[in-house]
Structure formats: C-alpha cells, structure tokens
Image: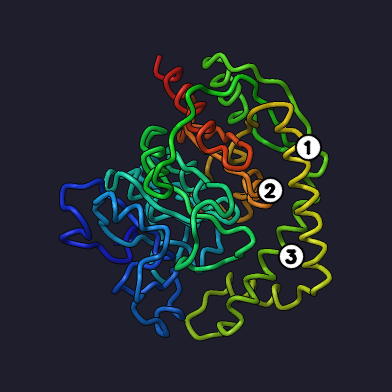
Amino acid sequence: MTTWIQRFDPPLGAPDGLRVAVKDAIDIAGFVTAAGCAAVRERAVPATADAACLAGVRAAGAAIVGKTTLTELCVNPAGDNAAFGTPVNPLAPDRMPGGSSSGSAVAVAAGEADIGLGTDTGGSVRIPAACCGIVGLKTTWGRVPTEGVWPLAPTLDTVGPIARTVTDVATGMRLLAPGWTVAPRPARTVGRLRIEGVDNAVEEPVDAALDAAGLKARDVRLPGWDATNWALHWIITGELWRAHHALLDADGLGAFVNQGLHAGRAVTGEQLDEGMAIRQRWQAEIAAVLDEVELLALPTLVGVPPLVADSAGFPFTQLTAPFNLAGVPALAMPVPSPGLPVPASLQLVGPMDGEDLLCATGLAIEAAGRR
C-alpha cells in the first residue's frame, strides 16, 4: 500500500461525495500526521483539529478517502520514500512518480481519488502531476491557509489540488478557496520562457499545444533566473533547520533529510537576509514581465521523467522552484506528445491570485488538445 499511509473505509464525509486524497503533511482531526518520516511518527500524537485548508472540503461534503504517502518531510522531489514505500507511477511504472506529493498524484492517476491535495514548496504538486501525466495547481503563496500543514519552508509553502483534468483541478481549487471561480476568458498574450538545457522532446509539445489553442506566444527573458538558486537553497534549508532542528541525527531519519538539516544549520542570518533580498527583486522582475504578458509558459520538467533505476541527479525542481520564490501561482498540465512514455507537461505561470486565468487558459489548451 505504498500510495497510502492510511485508507479510510468508510471515508470521512459523505460516502458518495467527491473522493479526496490528503497528503500526510496535512492534519486530519483524530489522526497522526507523520510527514512521511519514521522519526516523526514515533513522536507524533493525533491531530486535535483539521488543517485550516480542509474547511472547504468538509463544508462541501467531500469524501476524504485516505492520507497519502509523500517523500520524507516533503523534502525530496523525486517521490521515493524508503520508510513508507515509493508509490508506483500508474502511467509509467518504470519511472519516478515525482514528489514530494507522490501519493496524492498516484492516487488520482490510478483512479483511486478524484482530487488529491498536496503541498508545493519547490514544485511538489506540479512535479508529481507532470510525472504521472495529470494536472496540478500551485496556488499563490498565502492564498490557502497553511495552519495545520507540516512546514518545510514557511516562506514558500503552499497547498494545492491535483486532478486528472483542468476542470477537476478547478473543482479542487474551489474546495480550498470556496467562492473562487474560473476567469471568463483565457489569456490572450503568453510569454514563452526558454531555459537552457531543456530537452526539445518536451519543448516542442509545449509550443505545439500553445499554437493549437491559438495563443499568441512571444519569447521573454528573466535575467534574474540564475540568482534564484542560491536564494532557494538558503531559504529552504535554513527554514527547514529552524523548524525541525530537533530531528537532527534522529533515529529513523533518512540520510537525504538529515543532510538537509546539516546544510540548514550552516545557513547564516546574513545568507537568509540575502536570500530574502533576492526573493524581493525576483518578485518584482516576475511582476514586471507579467505586466507585459498575461501568463508565462514553459515545460514543467526539463525532460521526460527519469527511470526509477536512473533518477539520481535529475533536476526535478529546476523549472518549478523559481516560481515558489516569486510566490505566484502555476499550473502543470499534460499536452499531446506522440512517442513519449509520459506526456510532456506544460507549466503556465500567472500573476499573484491569477489561478482563475490559469485555469481558464488551461481549459482552452485542454479542449484544443482533444480536437
């Protein structure tokens, strides 16, 4: 049962309601949140209340069908978990499922849930959606409350929905933000972002999908892109250390996370300040380009998801994490990709609180792909 930490039978909520899978980084009242970590599970007690982001799920009478596996403490973007098991990618079992919200994506892709809820700090909703050939929405930072959600880097942490279609992701967004609606029209202007080293095998289907939907795309540049790497390293590892230093060298803690804690301990206050300064400049740069075009478009991953046996070193977060630093929303969706084992994933990036325009544009691209 590598997809699930715990299945609920009967489900929590209406038995015939929309089936929702909840990443085991999100508190559900009465159940332990282990965050994919054996060391945490040994110390944890059941949550006394739901995470705030589940209020709309409960109000809608959705059926929470279980808590899903994730990578340890939400840290690793590959999707593996030595202690709890690695969910198997239903679309390509020989390829990584992506993480850290691996179980939520696999549950949706396998038809075991209608909506998966995940968290996204550097791509953890979009990456598994891309690996499993489905849709994931990273929400605007601060739009969906994170009280009761396991923190990785609070400056960057978000909660978002995963589903098989853009229509269903929009349904998931309404669960997280009741009253939210899709924009009445798709974007008219799109900035096409091209990052060095991305495989043409995923670039070409992205271009073809934009063309098929009749979207006017023009190339744009983001000179501050490379500087985001240091800022993300300092913020993510520094905030991981500050939130979870008590787990350093703990029995049952995996080596990857423990290395992250050691790296975070070495981050100085000056480095964190510099990371935040880079973040502020980067947010201004993204805002400026989104004044010129309505959305940005690029692949979600630099290439086809890697084989399980050959995933070491694959840069899962290269194209996703910079938008966490900016705080803006981003939608990952599959596009027609003849000959590929997993469809290329198009990533659309919008302005702050632009989930409505992202979904409207995603719906137009999805409809064009079916023609």
Disc 3 marks which amino acid?
A: Trp
Crowd tier of the residue under label 3, counting other residues whose Cα lies within 10 Å: few below 14, some 14–19, many 20 or above = many
Mark with earlier residue (3, 2)? 3
Q: Is residue 42 visible?
A: yes
Task: Tell me the residue at 41%/50% (across/down).
Answer: 176
Disc 1 marks which amino acid?
A: Leu
Query: In the visual, does 270 lie left or right of 76?
Result: right
Q: Is residue 338 visible?
A: no
Mark with earlier residue (3, 1)? 1
Distance in Å between CA atoms under marks 3 and 2: 15 Å
Task: Tell me the residue at 71%/21% (across/down).
Answer: 218
Q: Mark 3 and mark 1 in contact? Answer it, CB < 8 Å.
A: no
The picture quadrant where one finds residue 267 is: bottom right
* Residue beneath disc 2: 326
Secondary structure of the residue carrying tag 2 is helix
Distance in Å between CA atoms under marks 2 and 1: 12 Å
The picture quadrant where one finds residue 37 is: bottom left
Percent from the top left, x then y, of residue 105? 40, 49
Secondary structure of the residue carrying tag 3 is helix
* Residue beneath disc 1: 222
| Relative height, residue 280 to residue 131 (above, below) | below
Q: Which mark is residue 344?
A: none
Crowd tier of the residue under label 2, counting other residues whose Cα lies within 10 Å: few below 14, some 14–19, many 20 or above = many
* Residue beneath disc 3: 234
